[in-house]
């Protein structure tokens, strides 16, 4: 099984389409909604899709054919280890523990696979060692 994160952008024309329901029903895929900013004028949905590579590929094609703009989020933030002072601020603020202290080195490590792209760590980092890789 594979898990991939995507940013879906909806227009006023397709925002009322039940695409997430159809993904589950017709593509037998698991969806985790990470973030949603949607109203009747459109909006953006960040989701994680879990399934085989082929299932995810078919699901993305379906979304695109429905007029939804699909952007894969391979990496939302990037931590610059050269700038990081290991102050631990990001460890405290991240809601999903995507930053952890390595017990051997006492350095802060970033676990990209845990990140749900909330963006909270970016402004919290005193030396600006965390940068956005995609705008949401
Ligand atoms: S907040 Fe910035 S400087 Fe502090 S540990 Fe996290 S990445 Fe490093
Ligand atoms: S963007 Fe949010 S979830 Fe991702 S590492 Fe930063 S605080 Fe954690």
Image: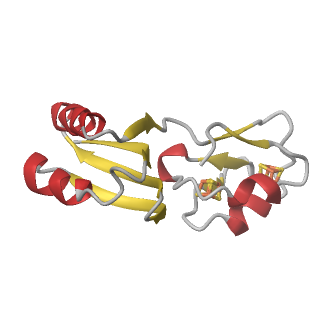
Q: Which of 66 and 99 is in front in this view?
A: 66
Q: Is 128 positioned to the left or the right of 44 in the image?
A: right
Q: Number of numbered discs present?
A: 0
Give the colour scheme shown. secondary structure
Which residue: 90% across, 54% down? Answer: 126
Is 17 located above or below residue 4 in the figure? below
Residue, far front: 13
Which residue: 64% across, 55% down? Answer: 99
Q: Position of residue 133 (x, y in %)?
A: 64, 36
Q: Nearer the viewer, residue 82 or 20?
A: 20
Quadrant housing residue 60: top left
Image quadrant where one finds the N terminus: top left
Q: Position of residue 107 (x, y in %)?
A: 74, 48
Q: Is 114 positioned to the left or the right of 129 in the image?
A: left
Quadrant housing residue 96: bottom right
Q: Where is residue 76 in the image (x, y as percent from the top left)?
A: 59, 42
Is 58 located above or below residue 23 in the figure? above
Which residue: 47% across, 46% down? Answer: 113
Quadrant housing residue 79: top right
Q: Position of residue 25 (x, y in %)?
A: 10, 56
Q: Quadrant of ligand 2?
A: bottom right
Which residue: 32% across, 39% down? Answer: 67
Is 78 located above or below residue 114 in the figure? above
């Amino acid at each position: 099984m594979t898990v991939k994160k995507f940013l879906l952008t909806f227009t006023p024309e397709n925002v009322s389409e039940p695409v997430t329901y159809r993904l589950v029903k017709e593509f037998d895929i698991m969806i985790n909604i990470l973030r949603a900013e949607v109203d009747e004028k459109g909006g953006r949905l960040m989701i994680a899709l879990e399934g085989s590579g082929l299932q995810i590929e078919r699901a993305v094609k379906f979304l695109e054919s429905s007029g939804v703009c699909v952007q894969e989020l391979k990496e939302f933030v990037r931590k610059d280890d050269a700038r990081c002072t290991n102050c631990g601020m990001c460890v405290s603020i991240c809601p999903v523990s995507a930053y952890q202290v390595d017990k051997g080195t006492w350095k802060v490590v970033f676990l990209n696979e845990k990140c749900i792209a909330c963006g909270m760590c970016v402004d919290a980092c005193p030396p600006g060692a965390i940068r956005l890789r995609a705008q949401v």
